[in-house]
Image (spheres, rainbow, N blue to C red):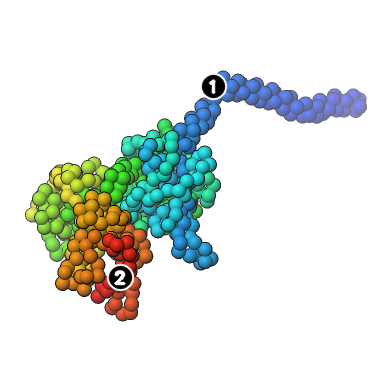
Amino acid sequence: MKVQTLLPASIVAIAAVLVLIATPRAIRSLTQAKESVEVAAAKARLTSSNALEEMNQATRDIASIVEPSVLSLSASSSSAGRSGRPLLNTGSAWVYDVDGHIITNAHVVDGAQEIDVQLHTGQSVPAQLVGLDLKTDIAVLRIEVDDLTPAQRSIDIPTQGDMVFAFGSPFDFRFSMSAGIVSGIGRSAGLADVDYENFIQVDAAINPGNSGGPLTDIYGRVIGMNTAIATGRGSTLGQGQFGGIGLAIPMDIIEFVADQLIATGEVAKGFSGVAVQPVRSILAPQLRDPLFRCVAEHYNGDGAIISRVTVGSPAQRAGLLVGDVIMSIDGVIISDADKVSSIVGTRKPGQVVVFQIWRPQPDRGDGVQMKVDVELTKRNPQMDAVDIADVLRNFGFSELITSTREACAELGVPNRRGVLVREINPKSQLAGIVVAGSVIVSVGGQSVGNLEDFYVRLGRGAITRRGIGRASVILSIALPSGTISEFDIPLR
């Protein structure tokens, strides 16, 4: 009886074990069958219609469109580096027009004695400097090559989130391409060597060697030029490694500068006549002024407060006042004070710009918004080094202008790139030594191409210190005879 009782229990236990063994196998079989069906369906969908392949093809098409206009660039200087060898700078460039003009960053070629570019075909050719603009970090070169393919360009302002593609030669990996999106627009990075900043911020990989290369949209149109990198150590021009933030000069500024450099060798920049400071940096002494106190107490938002209006300037004629807060210019929000000079400085003289301002009304304890049209005049390059300009004038340089073919022909002297001495004070120390028609070709060992280059370099410290309270600047001057002499001009 006992055996008969145990037998069914054993059978049940065995059956349970078989079920435990068989069930996972069955489940695995069902899962594998399901996966096989899903894989087969996925393959069918990818074969019939593949969105990723369409993206791949679109990216390949962009590369095909842009590649013929991209150049790799090397610039060498006779100045020796730490190794004792000539300094070599590498970067990128792109074809601007069919006449052989190419665009790159000024910091890539500044000070170079020889510049060579490599085309996408592998051909290497020399390039000649047409002109550069230190304030915007843009340079124009020219090469003698037939059948060039200029880049397609667009001045349309991109939108945050737009896909973009960066081309160039990072770390000398020539003709590279990276992809990303627009992270922001209208960025300022506080770069010491760029005065007018209005960058496109991207997360496409940009590294040393990408400087001067084109940034394109999804149609292969160049919308900007790769220029700077924001790293953990701060923003730099072509130095350091990519940290997720790349900065590019937008196309409207590039065309504004390049077209003028090609036409005249210099860039005429707009001038409004206002000095500004950040709204949030009103100083304690300024709070004694009811206008500044009204702004501090009642204005909320971004902007730049006008701290000075130049007498007789476009701003004064238009009715702008000290204490006015500039909210936007031509619809561009003024997120920081530097944006004012960046926008005005990249507008042409004679152009009318619209200032949206908040005008404090201390009596009412608030302010009123209004629009003011300002017709810009030409900015005087001497404003970059006013004190030094006065010293040079007192020393004998009565009039300095950009050297152009027309100006040299007027004085009957050979055309030479630099700053033309149009008039010498006959009672000065220079009389009989430097004559009208001479050309200043370098300052402090740095070449100059126009009057703005000259004063920007002076303003940025191309000066020799000779003991406490003594300073001088060394000018290399080409006389009409062709002789180049150096003059040590005391500044104090």
Residue type, mark 1 in image: Ser
Disc 2 versus disc 1: nearer the observer = 2
Left or right placement of residue 189 versus residue 433 in this view: right
Residue 403 makes an appearance in the image? yes
Tell me which residue sits at (42%, 53%) in the image: 108
Residue type, mark 2 in image: Phe
Tell me which residue sits at (16%, 59%) in the image: 308
Asked which quadrant contains residue 221, the reply is top left
User: Where does the N terminus fall, quadrant-wise?
Assistant: top right
Residue 326 drawn at (x, y percent): 20, 50
Asked which quadrant contains residue 144, the reply is top left
Image disc number at residue 49: 1
Left or right placement of residue 70 versus residue 369 in this view: right
Tell me which residue sits at (49%, 33%) in the image: 64
Q: Is residue 87 above or below residue 55?
A: below
Residue 61 drawn at (x, y percent): 48, 30
For marks 2 and 1, give the CA distance: 73 Å
| Residue matched to label 2 | 487
The mark that comes first in sequence, 2 or 1, is: 1
Residue 372 drawn at (x, y percent): 14, 45
Asked which quadrant contains residue 437, the reply is bottom left
Toward the left, the furthest residue is 363
